Image (spheres, coloured by chain):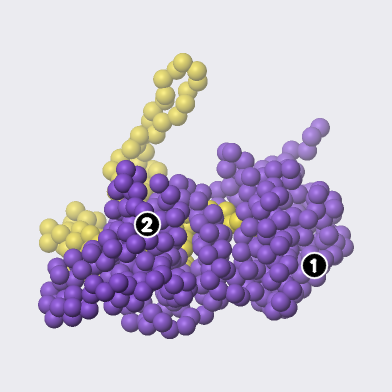
Chain colours: A purple, B yellow
Amino acid sequence: MDEVLLRTLTPRVIGILVRRGAGFAAAEDAVQDALVEAVRVWPRDPPRDPSGWLVAVAWRRFLDAVRADTSRRRREDLVDAEPEPGPAASTDDTLRLYFLCAHPSLAPASAVALTLRAVGGLTTRQIAQAYLVPEATMAQRISRAKRTVADVRFDQPGDVATVLRVLYLVFNEGYSGDVDLAAEAIRLTRQLAAAFRHEEVDGLLALMLLHHARRPARIRPDGSLVPLAEQDRGRWDTRMIAEGVGVLQAALARDRLGEFQAQAAIAALHADARTAGETDWVQIVEWYDELIRLTGSPVARLNRAVAVGEADGPRAGLAALEALDPTLPRYSAVAAYLHEREGDTATAARLYADAARCATSLPERDHLTRQAARLNNPPS
Amino acid sequence: MAKYLMLKHYRGAPAAVNDVPMEKWTPEEIDAHIQYMRDFADRLVKTGEFVGETALAPEGTWVRYDGDGRPPVTDGPFAETKDLIAGFMVIDVDSHERALELAAELSAAPGAGGRPIHEWLELRPVFGTPLTVTE
């Protein structure tokens, strides 16, 4: 059975139910029930019209739920209003769901969970497994999120920036469990880009593709991290890189620069270098300047210091670092790297050990500890 | 989102404000305390922030490897061991501030006289997943 097809249909079917008069929360529940039913029935009895099947089953589930509801009056209204043939699926519905699920009234984790369920068509169990929390907790997180947006009008236009932040979170902080959240984020961003022409949507899609292309070289089978300079570039996915570069170039040509396009441009410059030594660091510094102009982000300033260190030498990198707040995440790791490049291995080893103590993930801590150990145990 | 561990100590934490050992409470005070802890966990499930909890027996055994083919060496329990963990709860929250807020709420569990214990809890971040975009 084609699970991705099923998931692709999810937002459209929710949209159809909502336009037939179901509230978003009830529609979403009914569609989730229909998805579970589809997983059970389709393998032995595949429908000729998957979308029509889902709409029919979800609508029946919705009516059942309404009937079970205590509100008799509402039930009669709704049952009377149907069953005329519903309007066809529309990409506008999908777009509205993206906006609703990323509504600014939702906390990031709630927006992420709701997006993965209502737009991504994942089950609560899959989302719970992906984020390493119990299913009951995730179910509550999702129903609270639905209550939060209960009074938001479905046809109200939203802010695409909030949607992009949610998709970026799914991509950037996804565990690599049974559900590949990075791949799911790419699918959802691609679907958004098809429904909504916007430079930053394309910028984010390009950014994701360019980073995802490096994944086979970035993580060893044991989960340990390989720094960019040491990655086997032959293992990068060149087709995905080509797609990312193409999407980015088309976005940049429209001349409305944004932070995701700038970040993607930096990733594209890395992807473009056949070896680490051929990296065009001067251009990368320029893109960081753009990124800082656009966002003022301290993390961008920190990464700019690394790029300056490569373009103009470690001393220049350390000078760029001096202006920054030492409590920034990864500050010590960057300082350690630049000090090592400058030849001060004792300082570098101390800073790598500091950085390991502040790491926020196990692979990162192990990597930084190994860096300190390498400098503390020079080959004799 | 970030996960945090809230550690409760039998021993080794700084003294609580309402620092009376549990066996000196009234049975009703003990009931009220246990109910408070249950309600707290239930609330966290409802807010979508609960990950798990575990309570530990106060007495354990120290074990170490003693060489090939030899049985493990055991020792203890040691009365002088400073740090004795009573149990832990793992939460998944949007911010460090929220983690602090929840730890304070747990620390307010009622003890002797039905008054909050003001127990010190140790809040430790759990390692997350490495970020994909770091450059």
> Which chain hosts label 2?
A
- Image coordinates for residue A269, horizontal then vertical, percent: 77, 60
- Image coordinates for residue A87, horizontal then vertical, percent: 36, 74
Residue A194, by quadrant, is bottom right
The residue shown at (19%, 71%) is A66
Query: Along the line of sight, which residue is nearer the eye, B49 or A210?
Result: A210
How many residues crowd around disc 1 within 10 Å: few (fewer than 14), some, or many (20 or more)?
many
Instruction: Say what secondary structure mark 2 lies in.
Output: helix
Q: CA distance from mark 1 to mark 2?
A: 50 Å
Residue A323, by quadrant, is bottom right
Q: Amino acid at mark 2?
A: Pro
The residue shown at (27%, 60%) is A57
Q: Can residue A139 be seen? A: no
The residue shown at (40%, 46%) is A1
The image shows residue B94, relative to residue A128, as above or below, that is below
**A131 horizontally vs A277: left or right:** left
The answer to whether dots 1 and 2 both sit on one chain is yes
Which of pointers 1 and 2 indicates the residue nearer the eye?
2
- Image coordinates for residue B11, horizontal then vertical, percent: 35, 51
- Image coordinates for residue A68, horizontal then vertical, percent: 14, 68
Q: Amino acid at mark 1?
A: Val
Query: Along the line of sight, which residue is nearer the eye, A96 or B134?
Result: A96
Q: Residue tagged by mark 2?
A: A50
**A191 horizontally vs A55: left or right:** right
Instruction: Say what secondary structure mark 1 lies in.
Output: helix
Q: Residue tagged by mark 1?
A: A285
How many residues crowd around disc 2 within 10 Å: few (fewer than 14), some, or many (20 or more)?
some
